[in-house]
Amino acid sequence: MAFNEVLAVIGLALIAVSAIPQVVFFLKKGGEADPLSHWILMAAGVALFGTIVARSIEIDFPAVTNTYEAMIFFSASLCVVMAVLRLVSKKSTGALRWSVFGGTVIALALVMISSSPIVGKDVNPPIPALHSYWLVLHVTMAFIGEAFFAVSMVSAIAYLLTKEEERKKAIDRIMYTTVMIGYPIYTAGALIFGAIWAEYAWGVYWSWDPKETWALVTWLVYTAFLHSRFVMKVRGKLSAILSITGFFFTIFTFAGVNYLLAGLHSYAK
Amino acid sequence: MKAIFKFFRSVRLAIVLLAIIIVFFVFSTLVPQGRSATELMHAYGPALGQLVVLTGVGNFTSSPIFYISLGLFVLNLGVCSVDRFVKRLKSRAVKHFGPDIIHLSLLVLTVGALITSTVRREQDFTMAAGDAVNLPGGYVMKLIDFEFLKYPDGRPKAWISTVDVTQGNRIVRQGYKIEVNHPLAIGMLKVYQMNYSSDATIDFIDPAGGRATMKVGEGFSMGSDQLVFVGARRADAPAQGWIAQFQEYQGDKAVASFEFGQGEKIGQYSVDSIRARDLTGLRAAIDPGFIPVLVALALMAIGLTMTSIHKSKGVD
């Protein structure tokens, strides 16, 4: 087994291990979050980023150019985002534990899917169109933004399942804050750097390729989410539904478009 | 006038327009673009086909719904932006203009996109080493060399077109290497490396000693199948020259690939020689719309940063 694959397995194991204290504290009364899982998630994120670094050294270029690397990077970003949120959030760790648990399940699922035979793991240097640092910025920042959207989505589900008003308020706050942080990062990555890369690679900054259109639609959904809060002062259920819808579009943009709709981004399979 | 202003100032209108745009955009990715009405009716049946044709979702960037919904959205955005900006100026509260800058960026982006869609010019062409082409602005570009670099596994690593550009007697660029993601830029004019192809010809000798020539795209009949000459590649050993590539078709479907070198037989014909030359595929484009788009993207980044900093201070 190659070194980068060993790191991915360590990352997968650590994510699974981080779920144990989370489940134990769910079973305890008191509603407090465990003191350990975010450190384990941080270690998992480091191991998964290590996978990317090892592959990058092998091909002498940042390894974020195929589905396997994208899924590993997405999962690593999600682990680090959850760990940092837990570290900086002193008041609402009780509410955040639901979001972190949901995020842990997503991070685990991403690494498990990436390790399945349907996803190629060959370490290949990029074809000419992908040999660009604008592409690296485009991909990495889009996924970091999407990691925040993932936490928002699981918070939205937790919101819809929670009955206690105080807890609902705290979860609503997490749902909003994560979109508020993820939105500018996603905008910069998916749209701004994506457009600049396309201009350099193909001489056209926007071509209404299915992936571009779905990325724009995803951005519009989160734009609606933020405007509904800022201007219409919408909170709670509608925000939760928009957050879940936004993440559905995010996942379809990432995975669905690659396999179901042909276009310029078809090499992302 | 006030009623119209009030109508376009509405955030509810923005949300409704966003919903229409989202639904329309999503459907546009599910329907093949650029097909004729007959093809769409054939593919989707009379009822659904008629709906696709009427809504224009099969040619969505030139459909009335696309222009009307985006036009109304831009109008709505413009009115909201002015209204918000004026209110902010009059307000005694802490002034933060992050959202105004984001809105302004979207308006500038629209201007850039309009310029691109009306003024942008592009031309795709292929060249072999030694060829010259006239470019807009009185420039002449000559291809000095073309390299196709491959990784050990055969995947493409780089296409490099080395060119000289002159304008009259003046040398504008000498030995400039155009690569994918590294275009040649002379003012507004940019030349992009797009792809690679080869221009090939095979000379055959038939059993009676007669000669025949075949070009790319031509082929032989093999019963109900067709064996089509699709191109040539350099042999692994340079001394062996070129290898001719053929594809066998059953109707429209490619069922097998074959390669033939010099001296080999294809049925009763013997390959006498294979002549080919590498062609670089380039695109020349002039897009004055990209400058406002770049300004808009920079404004958007600034606006988002300012808004994020403001919101991080706890204002929801």
Image (spheres, coloured by chain):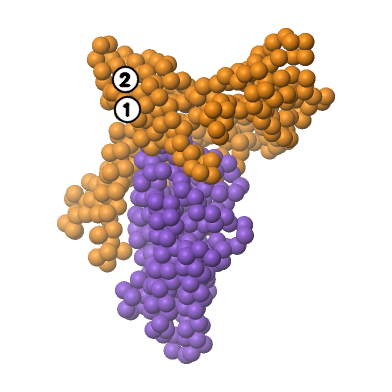
Chain colours: A purple, B orange
Label 2 crowd (10 A; few <14 / some 14-19 / many >=20): many
Assign the N terminus of chain A to one quadrant of the image: bottom right
Indicate the position of residue A79 as horizontal and vertical percent values.
43, 69
Q: Which residue is mark 1?
A: B176
Please state which of residues B43 and B145 is positioned toward the viewer in this rendering.
Answer: B145
For disc 2, the chain is B
For disc 1, the chain is B
Label 1 crowd (10 A; few <14 / some 14-19 / many >=20): some
Q: Amino acid at mark 1?
A: Tyr
Q: Is residue B312 visible?
A: yes
Query: Measuring 70% from the left and 37% from the top, which residue is drawn there?
Result: B44
| Dot 2: element | strand
> Which residue is outermost to the bottom?
A29
- Whichever of labels 1 and 2 marks the residue nearer the N terminus, that label is 2
Where B262 falls versus A173 (above or below)? above
Badges 1 and 2: C-beta atoms under 8 Å apart? yes
**Residue B288: quadrant of the picture:** top left
> Whole-Å distance between the Cαs marked 1 and 2?
8 Å
Q: Is residue A186 visible?
A: no
Do the residues marked 1 and 2 share a common chain?
yes
Q: Which residue is mark 2?
A: B165
Query: Measuring 28% from the left and 14% from the top, which residue is drawn there?
Result: B167
